[in-house]
Image (cartoon, coloured by chain):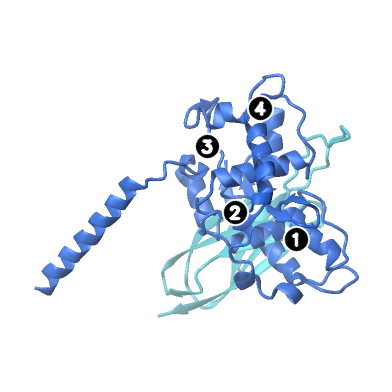
Chain colours: A blue, B cyan
Amino acid sequence: MTRILVCLLLSLSLGNACAQNTAGKDSRRSGFEDMGAATQAMQKDDALNPGMLWVQDGEALWKQPAGASGKACISCHAAAPGSMRGVAARYPAFDAGLSRPVTLGQRINQCRQQHQQAAPLRPESQELLGLEAYVALQSRGLPLAPPDDARLEPFRQRGRQLFAQRIGQLNLSCAQCHDGLPGKRLAGNVIPEAHPTGYPVYRLEWQAMGSLQRRLRGCMSGVRAEPFAYGAQELVELELYLKTRAKGMAMEAPGVRP
Amino acid sequence: MARTLINAPSTARRGEVIEIRATIGHPMETGFRAGEDGKVLPRNIIQTFSCRYNGELVFSAELFSAVSANPYVAFHTVATDSGTLVLSWEGDNGFSQAESIKLVVTA
């Protein structure tokens, strides 16, 4: 009798889950789903994911004192698994002092300069990517949650504009491929929907870790446009727009991409 | 010290086949690429990888320029006795690194 009851309950709850899926189905696809099985396995297994090498760096740097203050990240923030949970999911966030949004990497460098009195880390350096990856790892599996901050709105709008603006000798906008043709192919590659869920990612083509800005710059030179410099306001605005577009999708950092 | 990711069981039954997987952070510069100044970057690769199980060589591999950065090696061996597995990587510019893993073998 109990067995029948359990079966009944199970089928009921499964039925419920199915109903929910069809009702509020999220049709957005992470680039993860378009990868081959081997690359997916590489991302899912922490013993295989080369991004974890950078996470190791980040973990070491988190505890290592830097600059004239002699303070480490851990001195103020405590252990990252608790204190940094969900933080990376909220960036770029508005910085009141600068009156503009800053990315996670810029925030880390701000902290280094203001609180540690240390030199900022170079964009795309092993150290900065390591810290970003370590902080982002603490949000793995959580939904992307760009802040609901009215002050961000004009920047988000500019990001949207940039996404739709044709650039370069090929005269293409991001939106033409990533909104218009996702799932189709560009040469041998599936065009993804451009949801930045896994950054910083280990890209097999780069044979290294890279930030979302590196990826955006890659796309810009792909359409033969002059890429914006690292840390440029335009790249931050694009990132802000893309994070808003992917709001609610699960964080995968450190991701692996082909 | 280069960074490594090593995945191996800490215990095994005698006679069991165990899998060891190891990744090491290394640029594996091929020696064929030009740098930003147009000059060819000198080769900097890992040339050999080996695994010694209680001193006995159980696996070795040669690596070449075509192997990508941060090379990943996976292999199997038979668990015979409790002891240490020493994984070592050697390469250009005197690169040398060894990591050891403890293995407990039960009857």
Q: Which is more foreground, mark 4 or mark 2?
A: 2
- Residue sitting at x 71%, y 44%: A236
Residue under circle 4?
A165
Asked whether the beta carbons under mark 1 and mark 3 sit within 8 Å of each other, the answer is no
Q: Is residue A132 above or below residue A158?
A: below
Q: Which is more foreground, mark 2 or mark 3?
A: 2
At which x and y percent is residue A200? 65, 51
Asked whether the beta carbons under mark 4 and mark 2 sit within 8 Å of each other, the answer is no
The kind of residue on which mark 1 rests is Ser
* Residue nearest the viewer, comparing A222 with B13: A222
Q: Are marks 1 and 3 on the same chain?
A: no
Dot 2 surroundings within 10 Å: few (below 14), some, or many (20 or more)?
Answer: few
Chain hosting mark 3: A
Q: Is residue B63 above or below residue B21?
A: above
Dot 4 surroundings within 10 Å: few (below 14), some, or many (20 or more)?
Answer: some
Q: Are marks 4 and 1 on the same chain?
A: no
In the visual, does A30 lie left or right of A244? left
Asked whether the beta carbons under mark 2 and mark 3 sit within 8 Å of each other, the answer is no
In the visual, does B26 lie left or right of B73? right
Q: Which is more foreground, mark 3 or mark 4?
A: 4
Q: Real-space Cα distance between discs 2 and 3?
A: 23 Å
In the visual, does B82 lie left or right of A135? left
Residue under circle 3?
A193
Instruction: State the SS at label 4.
Output: loop
The kind of residue on which mark 4 rests is Gln
Q: Real-space Cα distance between discs 1 and 2?
A: 51 Å
The kind of residue on which mark 2 rests is Asp
Q: Which of the image's four quarters has the C terminus of chain B?
A: bottom left
- Image-quadrant location for residue B22: bottom right
Residue under circle 2?
A148
